[in-house]
Amino acid sequence: MANVKVQVEPVAKASGDAADELRSVYEDLHRNPELSFAEHRTAGIVAERLRSLGYAVQTGIGRTGVVGVLARGSGPTVLVRADMDALPVREQTGLAYASTATGIDPAGNEVPVMHACGHDMHVTALLGAAEVLAGEAAEWAGTLVLVFQPAEENGGGAQVMVDDGLFDRVPTPDIVLGQHVMPLPAGTLGAVAGPAFAATDELDIRMFGRGGHGSQPESTIDPVVMAAATVMRLQAVVSREIAGAETGVLTVGQIHAGTKNNIIPDEARLGVNIRSYTDSVRERLVGAVTRIVNAEAQASGAAREPEISRGDAFPVLVNDAQATARTLDAFRACLGDGAVIEVPRLMGSEDVGNLAAAAGAPLVYWLLGGADPALFADAALGPSLPAGVPSNHSPFFAPLPEPTLRTGIAALVTAALTWLDDPNETTSKGER
Amino acid sequence: MANVKVQVEPVAKASGDAADELRSVYEDLHRNPELSFAEHRTAGIVAERLRSLGYAVQTGIGRTGVVGVLARGSGPTVLVRADMDALPVREQTGLAYASTATGIDPAGNEVPVMHACGHDMHVTALLGAAEVLAGEAAEWAGTLVLVFQPAEENGGGAQVMVDDGLFDRVPTPDIVLGQHVMPLPAGTLGAVAGPAFAATDELDIRMFGRGGHGSQPESTIDPVVMAAATVMRLQAVVSREIAGAETGVLTVGQIHAGTKNNIIPDEARLGVNIRSYTDSVRERLVGAVTRIVNAEAQASGAAREPEISRGDAFPVLVNDAQATARTLDAFRACLGDGAVIEVPRLMGSEDVGNLAAAAGAPLVYWLLGGADPALFADAALGPSLPAGVPSNHSPFFAPLPEPTLRTGIAALVTAALTWLDDPNETTSKGER
Amino acid sequence: MANVKVQVEPVAKASGDAADELRSVYEDLHRNPELSFAEHRTAGIVAERLRSLGYAVQTGIGRTGVVGVLARGSGPTVLVRADMDALPVREQTGLAYASTATGIDPAGNEVPVMHACGHDMHVTALLGAAEVLAGEAAEWAGTLVLVFQPAEENGGGAQVMVDDGLFDRVPTPDIVLGQHVMPLPAGTLGAVAGPAFAATDELDIRMFGRGGHGSQPESTIDPVVMAAATVMRLQAVVSREIAGAETGVLTVGQIHAGTKNNIIPDEARLGVNIRSYTDSVRERLVGAVTRIVNAEAQASGAAREPEISRGDAFPVLVNDAQATARTLDAFRACLGDGAVIEVPRLMGSEDVGNLAAAAGAPLVYWLLGGADPALFADAALGPSLPAGVPSNHSPFFAPLPEPTLRTGIAALVTAALTWLDDPNETTSKGER
Amino acid sequence: MANVKVQVEPVAKASGDAADELRSVYEDLHRNPELSFAEHRTAGIVAERLRSLGYAVQTGIGRTGVVGVLARGSGPTVLVRADMDALPVREQTGLAYASTATGIDPAGNEVPVMHACGHDMHVTALLGAAEVLAGEAAEWAGTLVLVFQPAEENGGGAQVMVDDGLFDRVPTPDIVLGQHVMPLPAGTLGAVAGPAFAATDELDIRMFGRGGHGSQPESTIDPVVMAAATVMRLQAVVSREIAGAETGVLTVGQIHAGTKNNIIPDEARLGVNIRSYTDSVRERLVGAVTRIVNAEAQASGAAREPEISRGDAFPVLVNDAQATARTLDAFRACLGDGAVIEVPRLMGSEDVGNLAAAAGAPLVYWLLGGADPALFADAALGPSLPAGVPSNHSPFFAPLPEPTLRTGIAALVTAALTWLDDPNETTSKGER
């Protein structure tokens, strides 16, 4: 057990109070989601609130990113990160505070927008932690850097902030912390030491046929059939080319072709997302997509080769083993032994590792349960979700605000205090 | 041989003059295409021109339809029809007068628009015929009804005009005439007696999966795979369920699912277009789509049944056998024997038959060649196009204005005169 | 109406008598079917019977072929042909005389065998006609050549007989006649003038993967998936590359891969059969198979190119237009007007045309109805069969012996007499 | 480190001598493979050799199984097992002693047979160990039970031996030992403690169409398309329904339909093999096959439901953790530290666990490298094989006899001695 010096009860109480107070902020953020790099309203709310708490605030880092810094004497620099962006999903939760918002996607189309990945919870919990850590319940020495990052979903906002001079503008951290709300029982949390989130690669594919009248397929090369055959063939990549004991996921998240039932269009577009934990699997998956897309174009007799462009790519997220163990110990001490659960490594991806890599600092990134615990009654925690628990990115994704927000705030505060110095001690934690 | 009384030489000359004069109108219409029921600008140009020629003009019949009536004493009533609407296709002809226009499709999206089916040629040729028939080159008795119809491509504009009281507003015709520009050698034309254009049916299909994160397919039901499997299965309908000697076409002209590569969407949409010449084939095709769509949803374990809604449906277009023979005789007499070619019956569809059906009148609807004759040098006319000849609905579809426009005007004038009375005779043609 | 000199009533009576007598021969042949070039027992029965009727018999022409010649003075030479071979189908008719026979297929496997295409009916009817024409009911002058051909189904027996010197051994005919039993109402018959049976091509395909353990697909290239993807893709050839108004059929009649569920095999085999009526369609179908098979091997990353070998190929069967009209007139005169029905041209193929081509003689090949007429009560004759009527090659194919056999004998006799000379006339038919 | 009392040098020398001597036996067995339950010749060779070494031999246990028992005073009973059967694979190794043998598969067809899974190596190595353990190099007390099992590949021979009274006929063991040759570097070996081989399930599927003539698909229901669509759909089970972090494999190892290219057959057969490590995955995989097979039959409009029958099923093979650790320690001591490598758990399956389960004894089952070590030079050991290393069940599978046989014998002897008593000690190992 680590030598945890967190003031357990005051932190718990202050976290609960902050959660109550911020409930309306959470609902407001949920109702007003913004797409990647369009988090203007969210950034404004964050900046105003941080300023009112006494943080030195900088905005516009990495286009819409916001950073608040609070220094209390000498000691370690601890960076805590929340991501702010939402997704082009039409919300179907039926919540009173459900989103009806729209946004403009990268292709210029107006699309429905929803916080279907819980970044609103991340923002609210970090605002709550900002409040607790700025208040009297928390005693610490060092420098606190709160990063509200744009564009985790689309565009690699972490790297964009780094490239925009983040660590020229704020102190370089000794550790990077953060959390992600997940369909685990609300009130629990957990982290995998080592590789914890998969690498992700995106491929945007255009396949070219030859358009014509829907009644005269013989004078066309039908890109709808070409694309459908490709989708079916791509299913055999994971089923046939990746060993059962390896982990890889290949999703065709988008397929689009045609404007009218009686016109055979000129081309089809596929959007592919790939997850892997090793370079070998990654290369095989990407290579198989390229091979299949080209061959299916040939099977159709296409005159023009498909175009395959690489989109966002995140590396595997690796939690520092020692730092993770110490942080989980602190969680057990402060939130109770039962709050910390075993969690599997995920096929999801995260770019928070780019902040840690740029800083040369260890990373501890944990999962925060947000789902109704009653739904887990009969189910062991495993790679598959129990019935009725919506996954992230689902139009039904809806973390329970209570106790998720309270637990999320307490976890952030506990983790930060674990890595900041105790002003009542003479030895800096950073020196251990 | 019919007893053709068309004044061949004056008509030929007047048609050529009209074609020269209207060349700029054709290019203007081509540059400014409008989608179905949005033909406001086109209708305005048509109405103004008809009025200036002395026709009694009514607008707004069937939303954007225009009708011009010219009466010259007693005699038969002859209806000549052109359709006005364009298609959601991004023009790639490279013509100086190519379209860069956009429009709003039925789903509310802004889409590129192109005259990819030659309705601009139909409008211009009928304006030219209006001019010739209103002038001194043509001698006739009877009533001429020129119909400029909206929404042939989408929405069934012919029936909409009928339902809007077309034949309460203008005299009911004794015959209905019209033409369609096609990838046949420019300068030629032809018609099939009897069934000549296929019946068409449209099915709009929604298939329901269950959305989620692209990295967690196991907690979703992937509608992209469901839709792709359906498209592949639908190919086996024509290949396996329709006899080689029967004619049927089943095109999936649209497939759409997803907004982002790393989100598995909730549903996929397919747009199907079906062509047939008999009720038996039509029923088998529609039935097979329904059977396959439902079964593929079950194969995916979908919780919700697909929705299949019927869209536009046109019946088989049937040319009156005797009237067609007489009209083709007139074409041979006036345009030269070589101008009239054998043409196959088409898999395309047309709603002009709805005007004839509502009037209880025979129909003669011919095909007008618009393609470069040089490309046909080595190729027999057949169901397949020679290399380099773009089909209707292709983004490369581009009839040669000369001689297509001239031939089109002459054909319309000739056909109209064939069915109007000769004022120098004592017997009405209608009485023969 | 042709000047038919057939002695209608005696022929009808003699045909009925022969049918009654030969009923047991038919059932015996049906019970003892033999595969292509293995028609030893059948040939023996045929030869013995022909000899007993007074024909000069030669056997072993084209391996198992039998020819009987009967000359009655000078006059035209008329060749009438029946094919003898059966199919590797497990009979499921439930008939008392159903086959339980087996044979050895070209790959050396023992397979069930069935007369699923009615060649037993062809043989029996021609034996019946041989009897009638050798008897007193028929008066004629000329030379009758009855050909019992092997291997129509597999191996091109007609050409093999020609190549084996058929027309060096027997007189070259002035006309070639024959019939095929079909699922048309029993008691009827008909023929298409001009192209009547489709061309056929066979492609035998080997696709090469890399075998391995069923639990380790990642170390293999799975030929089962490769072949299945190819089959699905091949469905899009007819659905997308052949115009609705063209006729083409592409069937994958065989797919074979693997010996054990837990071994991924090294290769898969596909057997493809193609039907067409024009060279253009034929070339497009064959070309598309080649293109798709190669591309699907590449989509799988196959190290070795597929092997595609051409098997049997028959050209389009073309009935001589004038000769067909004259023969149908004779059928109407002798069998009744109602017996001759309109029939569509077929997607099936026949090699009897090779006999006519080698002889430089016109061909008349008609369809003989064998199905229960009651099943056609509500159905128009068309390209699709009424419910409950099994097609040729079905394991349920079972022509009604009565009246099919009687009609078949009468038709053969009538047709032969139509083209032989009438000994009571002074002018030879051949001179007309 | 265990207290290993194996006489390292004498055992190594005796194992090498035995390997040299048995090289010809190995080649003979390889040249004469026998299918499951047909291992008559192999069993005869085994029985004769065991008898000549002084073992009490029983044959015909579980049809073709052979057991040799050698008792040396009181002490533990140690069962060592080798499996004897080969596979229906056509050998392509090009070895001088390659098989050209054939056998009769369960369907009654003659098929090529090959030792493509190395059971010939298992048999030879156990004969070598029998010799060493019966000789003077090995000192031990207890009872040695050598089981030569039939039908590991097909038919569940281990359970058949148990059901045939194996443990009524020979002493019930205190431990069960065995090995499997694998594409790991020859000279190495390894074992996973805990779950080590996957569960396997086999499904034999018949899908029913309606046969007919290849030119008339419209009158049939094509089972080739039905089966191909099913195969493609089944690829989406692993790719979409099993989480990236779970392990599951679904192989269609057999697909068979049709006898002739121009006949559409009545049915198609699929042979499916499934691998899993948990009940949840197992149930999802089997359930998905059932769901998809039924739905694809409906998509084809099949009149008859598919038949799905369950074949062989083995549970997960679980190595006893403590016993495995102790055995691996002995391997390190006797064969060298470098000989024992980390190996992954496998997707392959094994029924040796049924012997341990029936005896209530712990199991230690290790992997024996048989591939050319040079091929592993640049490749980390992982779930995927380096290029050029054929997997088990491949027609190219060919373990290097040297040093594989020597290492295999030494490993079996070492493991057996580890669990037998040392006659020079007073404490039985069994009592520790």
Image (cartoon, coloured by chain):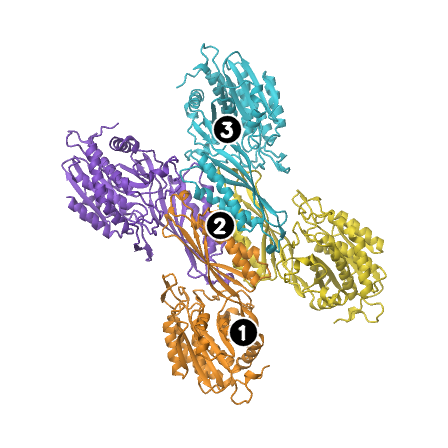
Chain colours: A purple, B orange, C yellow, D cyan
Q: Amino acid at mark 1?
A: Gly
- Which residue is under mark 2? B296
Q: Is residue B193 visible?
A: yes
Q: Position of residue A156 (x, y in %)?
A: 30, 47
Of B171 and C76, nearer the camera is B171
Quarter holding residue C337? bottom right
Quarter holding residue A112? bottom left
Q: Amino acid at mark 3?
A: His
Q: Residues within 10 Å of mark 2 (few under 14, many from 20)?
A: many
Name which residue lies at 45% across and 30% down. Answer: D196
B169 sits left or right of C273 in the view: left
- Which residue is under mark 3? D180
Of B73 and D423, nearer the camera is B73
Q: Helix, strand or loop at disc 1?
A: strand
Name which residue lies at 44% across and 27% down. Answer: D191
- Output the chain of dot 3: D
Q: Residues within 10 Å of mark 1 (few under 14, many from 20)?
A: many
Name which residue lies at 75% across and 59% down. Answer: C408
Quarter holding residue C261? top right
Q: Position of residue B368 (x, y in %)?
A: 50, 73
- Do tag 1 and tag 3 residues touch (Cβ < 8 Å)? no
B420 sits left or right of D106 in the view: left
Q: Is residue C165 visible?
A: no
Marking on residue B190: 1
- Output the chain of dot 2: B
Give the label, 1 or 3, closer to the camera: 1
Q: Helix, strand or loop at disc 2?
A: helix
Do discs 2 and 3 belong to a common subunit? Answer: no
